[in-house]
Image (cartoon, rainbow, N blue to C red):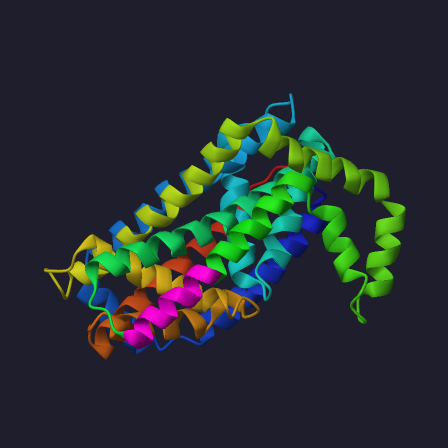
Amino acid sequence: MKKKHQNGFFLFGLAVLAVMVSQLDFQEVMAGLQRAGYWFFAVIALWFFLYLFNTGAWYLIIRSLSEKRVSYWWLYKITVSGFALNYATPGGLMGGEPYRVMSLSPKIGTECASSSVILYAMTHIFSHFWFWLLSVVIYLFTQPLHLPILLLLAAVTAFCLTAIWFFLKGYRKGIAVSCLNLLSRFPIVKRWAAGFLVRHQEQLAQIDRQIAALHQQNRRTFIAAVSLELVCRIISALEIFFILLVILPSVNFLQCVLILAFTSLFANMLFFMPLQLGGREGGFLMSAKGLQLSFGVGIFVALLVRLRELIWTAIGLLLIKFDKKR
């Protein structure tokens, strides 16, 4: 990646991060850290291991698409930086994915890099729907049920099954050309999308062929990548478990899975906000209340998770500067 592009990503992310930090109540932050004690360091360390799963899923996809090899630990660094840019960018995928493509293109080619990034983004999102569907099953067997909750769970189930069908269709036929065709119907971007589709028709078709090949010819790789992402979602509930142990020693892991599931579902509905500001906090409060936990518990968990996100966002942005120009 050119140095000016690298600096652009870094400075943009740094500016947004500074805005996010300025919104914190530092008195409240210090009180939360003192209360959490060493468990907060366990939360920070946990994400070092969770990013190993994310990197592993992307690494499997790259190996299935290209004979050229990339270093796993270099890819780990790009993964962490990509997620940092996603956290800091309104619209989520508008920051990290271009950075990943531009970083990987010199090593395996632009088409292969684009295919792998699109496939990984699809796999990452696809695993969320399976996670939410699994959480519905957990809720049915572990929590008291009444009509409003059953209706909500039915709506979530229908939403997840529809999304899973849509993604499976995208995996079978490719999604790049379809997305550009869809964008070409929207007033603001239709001229750009139509022009891009005409100029890059062959490249986009090749990307779609590579996407379809992973699902049809490399079924084991596809299942392994999705499984790694799903396991990562489940294990990430340990973050909430560690935090809640400080104030609720009787908390169980399945409760934490449910809190994470409903929080992430609510926060992803507000994907257009940088760092999902407000959406994640609201999700924690709603899920805590739904599981008969106190308002203060939701606030405490949301604060420490927000701090963890800011710390790993800062780490990811710093790693951008450690990418040596070759």
Q: In this view, does 19 lie to the left or right of 261?
A: right
Task: Please check the rendered image and state whether residue 152 is part of the magenta-colored stretch, yes or no.
Answer: yes
Total marks shown come to 0
Residue at coordinates 68% horizontally, 41% vertically from top-left?
173
Q: Give the range drawn in magenta.
A: 147-158
Q: Is the magenta stretch mostly helix, strand or loop?
A: helix
Q: Is residue 291 left or right of residue 166?
A: left
x, y percentage for residue 196? Answer: 84, 52
Task: Please check the rendered image and state whether residue 205 is part of the magenta-colored stretch, yes or no.
Answer: no
x, y percentage for residue 47? Answer: 36, 48
- Taking the view exactly as shown, the residue that stands out farthest to the left is 250
- Quadrant of the frame with the N terminus: top right
The relative height of residue 147 versus residue 243 in the rendered view (above or below) is: below
Who is closer to the viewer here, 262 or 52? 262
Who is closer to the viewer here, 171 or 180? 171
Residue at coordinates 64% horizontally, 39% vertically from top-left?
172
Who is closer to the viewer here, 296 or 115? 115
x, y percentage for residue 22? Answer: 46, 75
Q: Is residue 171 left or right of residue 133?
A: right
Residue at coordinates 70% horizontally, 50% vertically from top-left?
5
Decide if residue 321 is in sight here: no
Residue at coordinates 72% horizontally, 39% vertically from top-left?
208
- Quadrant of the frame with the C terminus: top right
Decide if residue 248 is in sight here: yes
Occupied quadrant, residue 113: top right
Q: In this view, does 186 lie to the left or right of 240?
A: right
x, y percentage for residue 247? Answer: 14, 66
- Taking the view exactly as shown, the residue that stands out farthest to the top is 67
Occupied quadrant, residue 31: bottom left
